[in-house]
Every structure is written in structure tokens, then in C-alpha cells.
């Protein structure tokens, strides 16, 4: 083990499917709006993007959940998946209460071909500065996860220009000009590979690809338009770095995902975790999958649901506790305490 190995290495051990004293736990969006201290720091920064561009404040919000919950076994970079398309010139902003909006969505083959591939240490320097500052702040207590969106998920935002319920613009592109969509996905793949390699160079110790919208693809299209690009990114990164792939809504394609070279698969709450383990065997680690809405229920119910997830994961090495998607802003911080105490007692 290198001198750089974190003192708490449960998460990295589980990713290698080595035995651990208890399942490691971290929570998607663990630094976020459910914490009053996060809301105060964001207020101080002025906006979400101003927070992302301030490395010291990024380190502050990463530290907040770790101070509140000593049971957490990993930290995740504070940033967003949409930094990459912003750096490609799309003009990201977050409208209050509306989510992300791009001033310049891409809709045509000509626009796609004109997109630049950003240099991560230039246009995305602020993210690399955040990685370096957070890594120094963690002082090797815990591993740091870097991340990006999957090419398909980023393409959804780039073509739609904002959050969407029906994905009609990107689906129309898929059916009217699939070659142009493939050129867009290839360009995002190139940009994302460089971005993640730069996060590794800046100090990230594991990586996660968020395929948040993989589940809206048809059965026939999931591999061609989402998974294959994720696998290309995985293949282009150093093989000793663990990469987690999380396709929300992708539970019916676990077999294909398990063969794509990732160290772990993230599972959303619709997946039967025990059946997923039986299906993929011991080939890779699994992460998830407590329903985030369970944190809105009673402590007794929440304890039981958390325990049911741990039981479904079973005793085999290679399991990482998490929710099935990000923790939501309406959850009380004490609910996460209940969850993490249950995991720590396992
Ligand atoms: O108002 C605020 O303070 C901003 C809320 C917020 C936060 C805390 C956004 C806007 N992004 C983030 C941080 C973030 N985003 C992290 C940080 C680390 C952590 O988990 O603690 C991560 C990993 C992300 C990833 C992300 N951003 C995803 C993939 C995961 C997922 O939720 O499926 C997606 C889809 C986004 C886009 C995005 N950014 C922000 C919002 C509200 C959204 C979702 C918009 C939508 O639903 O379409």
C-alpha cells in the first residue's frame, strides 16, 4: 500500500472485494441542501456555481457531513456533472427552483461538430483546484471520490437545454440523425476521459460515472447509446483506479453493465439487491440501494428498511452501502443518523 492510502480504507477495500469489518457507507449528495450548514455556506458563496468555483468553500461543504456523521467512509468531490458541458461553451446557469438551464443548447449536427473539447486544467481548473484543496483538507483520513456524468446523461442536458420529463428533443435526434448523436457522445466521451484523468492527477482515489438518465433509453438502445461510451471511458483510464457506474433505472440491464469493466455498479431502489448479487455473482462490487424516500418515514421503519438492504446485500465482500439515488432536501439530518448508525452496527 502506498503512503497515500487513506487511514479509513473500508470503501477502497470493498471496491476490490476484500473483506471489511462492516459495509462501508457514503451517501449520494451527502453534502447538500438537507444540511442547514450547507445552506449557510451556499448563502455565503452567493450561488451554487459560485460555491463550486471556490475551492475553500467546496472543502468546507465536503467536511460538513463528515463532521456530523463519523460513520461515513468516503468523501465525494463537491461539484456538478454539468461543469463539462458548461466548459464546452453551453452557458450553464441554475434558475432558482428550476434546476439547470443552458443558454446555448446543441440541436444540429453543425453545432455538435463545432463544440470544443475543454482542457481540464484550463476551462475546468476550478474543479481541479477543488479536488486538490479537498484532498489536502481530508489529510488522508478518508478516500475522495471524483465523478462525472455519463456521456448519454450529459448529452440529454446539452440537447434538451434543461431538465426534462419526456426527453423528446434528444430522442428525436436519436431517431432523425443517430450519426450526429454518436458524434456528440464521442466528443463528450473524449472530454470526460480527460476530465476524469485530471481529477485523478489532482488527487481523486476512486471515480463514479452518473448515468442518471440511462433508464430512459429503450431496451434496444441502452448499450449502444449509453453503456458503450461509459465502457470506453473506463478502458481509457488507469486500470488500477476503481470506477463505479450508476445507471438510474438500469436495473433490467445489470448483466450487460457487469461486463463493461467497472469495479462496482450502483443500484437504484427499484432493484432487488439479493437478486442482483445472484445475477452478477462475485465479478464486481455493488453499491446502494435504500429508497431515498424511506428517510421520510418513522425511525423504526427506516431502521428496518436499512437492515433489509444490508440483509439483501449478504455477507459476501464487495458491498458498499448507499441510497438508491441522492438524499433529498426535505429529509431531516437526524434521519441520516438513523441510517448510518444501523449500517455501523452491521
Ligand atoms: O441549490 C443547490 O445548492 C444546488 C443543488 C445541487 C447540488 C448540491 C446541484 C444542482 N448539484 C449539486 C452537487 C452534486 N451534483 C454532487 C456533489 C457531491 C455529492 O453528491 O455530495 C454530485 C455528485 C452531483 C451530480 C449530479 N448533478 C447529477 C447526477 C446524480 C443525480 O442526481 O442523478 C445530476 C443529474 C446533476 C444535475 C443537477 N445539478 C443540480 C441539480 C438540482 C441537478 C439535477 C437536475 C435534474 O433533476 O435534472
Image (cartoon, grey):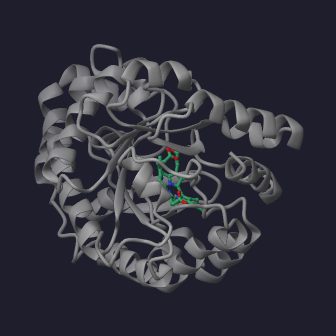
Residue drawn at 49 percent across, 33 percent down: 267
Residue 231 placement, left or right of 218: left
Relative vertical location of residue 9 with respect to residue 190 in this rendering, above or below:
below
**Of the pair 85 and 62, the residue shown nearer to us:** 62
Identify the residue at the far top of this view.
220
Residue drawn at 87 percent across, 43 percent down: 299
Residue 112 placement, left or right of 320: left
Which quadrant of the figure contains the N terminus? bottom left
Among the 4 quarters of the image, the one containing residue 35: bottom right
Residue 52 placement, left or right of 84: right
**Of the pair 8 and 334, the residue shown nearer to us:** 8
Among the 4 quarters of the image, the one containing residue 88: bottom left
Residue drawn at 43 percent across, 71 percent down: 6
Which quadrant of the figure contains the C terminus? top right
Measured from the top left, where is residue 344 in percent x and y? Answer: 68, 53
Relative vertical location of residue 203 with respect to residue 205 in this rendering, above or below:
below
Amino acid at each position: 500500500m502506498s503512503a497515500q492510502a487513506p487511514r479509513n480504507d473500508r470503501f477502497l477495500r470493498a471496491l476490490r472485494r476484500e473483506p471489511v469489518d462492516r459495509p462501508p457507507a457514503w451517501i449520494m449528495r451527502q453534502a447538500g441542501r438537507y444540511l442547514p450548514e450547507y445552506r449557510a455556506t451556499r448563502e455565503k458563496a452567493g450561488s451554487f456555481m459560485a460555491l463550486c468555483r471556490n475551492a475553500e468553500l467546496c472543502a468546507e461543504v465536503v467536511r460538513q457531513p463528515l463532521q456530523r456523521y463519523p460513520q461515513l467512509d468516503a468523501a465525494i468531490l463537491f461539484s456538478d456533472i454539468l461543469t463539462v458541458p458548461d466548459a464546452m461553451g453551453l452557458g450553464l446557469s441554475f434558475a432558482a427552483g428550476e434546476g439547470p438551464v443552458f443558454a446555448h443548447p446543441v440541436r444540429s449536427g453543425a453545432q455538435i461538430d463545432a463544440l470544443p473539447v475543454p482542457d481540464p486544467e484550463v476551462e475546468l481548473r476550478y474543479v481541479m483546484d477543488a479536488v486538490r484543496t479537498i484532498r489536502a483538507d481530508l489529510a488522508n483520513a478518508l478516500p475522495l471520490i471524483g465523478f462525472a456524468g455519463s456521456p448519454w446523461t450529459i448529452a440529454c442536458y446539452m440537447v434538451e437545454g434543461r431538465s426534462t420529463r419526456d426527453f423528446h428533443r434528444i430522442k428525436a435526434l436519436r431517431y432523425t440523425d443517430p450519426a450526429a448523436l454518436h458524434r456528440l457522445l464521442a466528443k463528450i466521451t473524449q472530454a470526460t476521459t480527460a476530465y476524469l484523468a485530471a481529477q485523478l492527477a489532482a488527487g481523486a482515489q476512486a471515480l463514479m460515472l452518473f448515468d442518471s438518465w440511462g433508464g430512459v433509453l429503450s431496451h434496444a438502445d441502452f448499450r449502444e447509446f449509453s453503456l458503450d461510451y461509459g465502457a470506453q471511458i473506463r478502458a481509457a483510464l488507469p486500470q488500477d483506479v476503481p470506477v463505479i457506474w450508476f445507471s438510474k433505472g438500469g436495473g433490467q440491464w445489470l448483466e450487460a453493465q457487469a461486463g463493461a469493466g467497472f469495479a462496482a455498479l450502483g443500484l437504484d431502489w427499484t432493484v432487488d439487491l439479493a437478486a442482483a448479487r445472484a445475477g452478477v455473482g462475485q465479478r464486481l462490487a455493488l453499491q446502494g440501494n435504500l429508497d431515498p424516500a424511506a428517510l421520510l418515514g418513522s425511525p423504526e421503519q427506516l431502521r428496518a428498511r436499512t437492515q433489509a438492504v444490508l440483509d439483501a446485500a449478504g455477507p459476501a465482500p464487495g458491498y458498499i452501502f448507499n441510497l438508491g439515488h441522492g438524499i433529498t432536501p426535505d429529509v431531516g439530518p437526524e434521519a441520516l443518523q438513523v441510517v448510518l448508525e444501523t449500517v455501523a452496527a452491521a
